[in-house]
Image (cartoon, grey):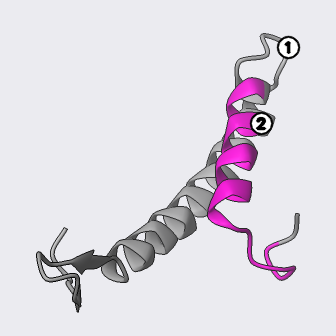
């Protein structure tokens, strides 16, 4: 997936990272391929981490009275 194509969902990001790990564990991978996969994987991980942080900020808590209250605490 190119960097300029659609943004990956969190789930797609983790699936991609699993694929990267599987490829990097292949004993026949070259050093250049390994570095390339690592670099792409780190970019995807950084974006996924940002997305998870954004979701956490949107988490709403329900207080004892059943009222919604937003929180930025996590």
- Residue 22 sits above or below residue 36 on the image: above
Question: Can you give x and y, in whole percent of width and height, for residue 69 in the image?
Answer: 21, 89
Say left or right for 11 vs 6.
Answer: left
Give me the C-alpha separation between circle 1 and circle 2: 15 Å
Residue located beneath label 2 in the image = 19
* Circle 2: element type: helix
Q: Quick one: 27 or 45, which is closer to the camera?
A: 45
Residue that protrudes farthest toward the left in the picture:
64
Residue 17 at x, y percent in the picture: 67, 44
> What x and y, as percent, mark residue 72?
20, 83
Compared with residue 24, is residue 71 higher up or lower down, i.e. above or below?
A: below
- The magenta stretch spans which residues? 3-22
**What residue appears at the point 20 percent right and 84 percent down from the top-left corner?**
71
Residue 70 image label: none
Task: Mark 1 and mark 2 in contact? Answer it, CB < 8 Å.
Answer: no
**Residue at position x 75%, y 48% from top?**
16
- For the stretch drawn in magenta, the main secondary structure is helix
Give neighbour class at mark 1: few <14, some 14-19, many 20+ (Cα, 10 Å). few
Residue 67 position by quadrant: bottom left
In the rendered structure, does residue 9 fall within the stretch colored magenta? yes
**N-terminal of the two: label 1 or label 2?**
2
Quarter of the image where the C terminus is located: bottom left
Q: Identify which residue is drawn at 23% across, 77% down.
A: 62
Q: Decide if residue 11 is on the left or right side of residue 64.
A: right
In the image, taking residue 42 as reference, residue 7 lies left or right, namely right
* Residue positioned most to the front: 65
Q: Nearer the viewer, residue 62 or 74?
A: 62
Residue annotated with mark 1: 28
Residue 49 lies in magenta, yes or no?
no
């Amino acid at each position: 997936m190119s960097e300029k194509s659609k943004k990956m969902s969190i789930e797609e990001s983790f699936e991609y990272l699993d694929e990267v790990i599987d490829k990097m564990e292949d004993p026949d991978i070259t050093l250049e391929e390994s570095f390339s996969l690592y670099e792409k994987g780190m970019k995807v991980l950084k974006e996924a981490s940002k997305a998870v942080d954004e979701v956490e900020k949107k988490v709403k808590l329900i207080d004892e009275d059943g009222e919604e209250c937003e929180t930025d605490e996590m």
